[in-house]
Amino acid sequence: MPLPGEFSLIARHFRRLAGPGSLDLSDDAAVFDPPPGCQLVAAADAVVAGVHFLPDDPPETIGAKLLRVNLSDLAAMGAAPLGYLLTVALPHGTPDGWIAAFASGLAADGERFGVHALGGDTVSTPGPATFSLTILGTVAPGAALRRGGARPGDRVWVSGTLGDGALGLRVLRNELAPDAAGHLARRYRLPEPRLTLGAALAGVARAAMDVSDGLLQDLGHLCRASGCGAVVEAASVPLSDAARAAIGADPALLSLALTGGDDYELLFAAPSERSEEVLTRAAAAGTAVTPIGVFVEGAAEVVARGADGAPLPAQQGGWTHF
């Protein structure tokens, strides 16, 4: 007897994503034993066509981005990936080849990052394509990085470079000329989860999260959770060569490095006296980090200062869904 449509689709495209504990995606739930001596970490993110990716983005990059933004949440907790649950909501008539390419992006990154599907759901929708992934990870007991914990005097650090994702979106919308290497568009479509760095920061970072909705907005979340404020030196915010060139041609684009989001870099607090240790651990993790400011006593507010030390005009807030 042939399989019903939904189960046939799962067999064709998603069974290859299955890992240990998934029961080959043939049951209603996964069954697995967590690694001994570890705490479980769980997070979930969804991506929606027209909101988190462009409808004409290559489907393999959409599958990869879905996994990477969830892995970034694990990185911000200092956790290692264990497995994921996937929900796929596809409009009627989605070509089979599109679904195959989407699954291929997930499969390739699953192999790269050592994480596989445990189960999930497939449904049809009259609305835009929507994908939700629940990621599971592990961390040593009591070692998870949290948003609350920064103290006045701690340095504000970020990994990698900022502004690339937001500039890349403008490139893909034909609102900005592309850079020759395609760096900006690639950074929007394929963020790099900083898993190795997140694990390396355990015991030295006091608070952490990833930059998904904009540096100033996300730093505000850290401040509110920690009960302090922060001052950011705009000139210290790290930029890629491609971003620097775009901003050089249009200085107004600098605000995207402060508010744009979509970079999925780590934002964290660490004691100023341990700065050399932060740099050493980051170098061992193969990821550049940059101090961009300091946490201060007072209200949970973020101030960005220009090269002259004067506060910059209030920046537009980062991304919000509501």
Image (cartoon, rainbow, N blue to C red):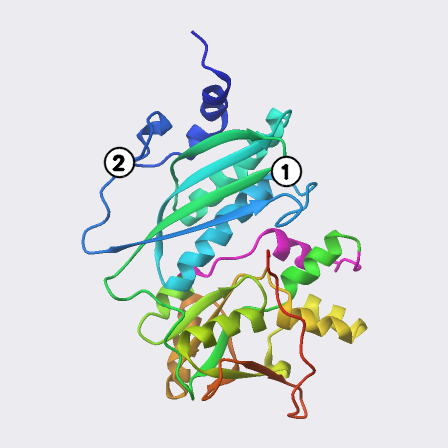
Instruction: Return the x and y of residue 89 as percentages of the image width and height.
Output: 54, 34
Residue under label 1: 128
Q: Secondary structure at mark 1?
A: loop
Q: Is residue 75 above or below residue 91?
A: below
Q: Amino acid at mark 1?
A: Pro
Q: Nearer the viewer, residue 144 or 61?
A: 144
Residue 57 in view:
yes
Magenta region, mostly helix, strand or loop? loop
From the image, which quarter does the N terminus lie in?
top left
Instruction: Return the x and y of residue 148 as percentages of the image width and height.
Output: 38, 73
Q: Nearer the viewer, residue 308 or 225?
A: 225
Q: Is residue 182 left or right of residue 227?
A: right
Q: Is residue 102 left or right of residue 81?
A: right
Instruction: Return the x and y of residue 321 as percentages of the image width and height.
Output: 59, 56
Q: Secondary structure at mark 2?
A: loop
Q: Amino acid at mark 2?
A: Val
Q: Earlier in the sequence, mark 1 or mark 2?
A: 2
Residue under label 2: 31
Q: Nearer the viewer, mark 1 or mark 2?
A: 1
Q: Is residue 180 magenta?
A: yes
Question: Which image quarter: residue 7?
Answer: top left
Q: What crowding class fits label 1: few (fewer than 14 Cα within 10 Å), some (14-19), or many (20 or more)?
A: some
Q: What crowding class fits label 2: few (fewer than 14 Cα within 10 Å), some (14-19), or many (20 or more)?
A: few
- Toward the left, the furthest residue is 36
From the image, which quarter does the C terminus lie in?
bottom right
Q: Are marks 1 and 2 in contact (CB under 8 Å)?
A: no
Q: Is residue 100 left or right of residue 274?
A: right
Q: Is residue 133 magenta?
A: no
Q: Is residue 286 above or below residue 131?
A: below
Rounded to the nearest angstrom, the CA distance separating label 1 from label 2 is 32 Å
The boundaries of the magenta stretch are: 175-195
Instruction: Return the x and y of residue 58 as percentages of the image width and height.
Output: 65, 41
